[in-house]
Image (spheres, rainbow, N blue to C red):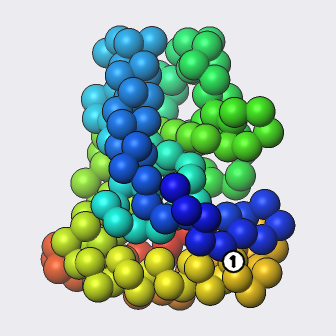
Amino acid sequence: MTTVAMSNMVWVVDYDPEWPLRAADAIDDLRGSAPGLFVELEHIGSTAVPGLAAKPVIDLMAAVHHLAEVGPHQGALAGLGFHPHDNGMTDRLLYVRADGQVRSHILHVVTLASWPTRNQRILRDYLRAHPDEAARYARLKRAIVEAGTAPGEYARAKTALVQELTDRARALLGLPSEPVWEK
């Protein structure tokens, strides 16, 4: 894996073909630790798009019937290293797994009712189908990091392009535009 750009602990690296394998292992572990909890569970985010440069953090999204169902499984999730994380999102539960002080995985738990229209899934699929747009996104991410953008500003600096691409992807599916959430 070649480091593409790094700044203040935000780094973007070339695509690693191990990412899908790491995601599959985490998915298997999550399903095994909380049998029957997750109705759907997928690899999302930039590490789920072949060839796309990304921060080396595996994003996963899981669907449950009701978010309240997750509480009794907190211990099992913690046993896998997934700990609750509050970053202001109110439409999902968020869990972070870190190797040392470095995030390795993020688990977004959402309702099954919202699953088909989740922007992260829609954008992932769009980028997989449109490699030129994925390359454009990678160039922006590299430029943001190379410019020395602070960690707290990295996501915001991508918001305009993420919104544009997500809008285009949603339109192809006959869905209305919906604001992306970039902290």
Q: Considering only vertical position in the picture, is 97 above or below 167?
A: above
Q: Is residue 106 left or right of residue 161?
A: right
Q: What is the crowding at mark 1: few (fewer than 14 residues within 10 Å), some, or many (at least 20)?
A: many
Report the side of 92 relative to 31 (left or right): right
Front residue of this view, candidates 45 and 99: 99
Given residues 164 and 102, the one toward you in this image is 102
**Left or right: where does residue 71 sit relative to residue 60?**
right
Residue appearing at x 75%, y 75% in the figure = 153
Per the image, label 1 sits on a secondary structure element best described as: helix
Residue 92 visible from this viewpoint? no
Name the residue rendered at 55%, 12% in the picture: 76
Residue 28: x percent and y percent?
Answer: 35, 22
Residue 14 in sight: yes
Residue in the image at 36% along x and 37% along y:
21
| Image point (70%, 55%), residue name | 88
Where does label 1 land, which residue? Answer: 145
Q: What residue occupies the far front of the structure in this picture? A: 2
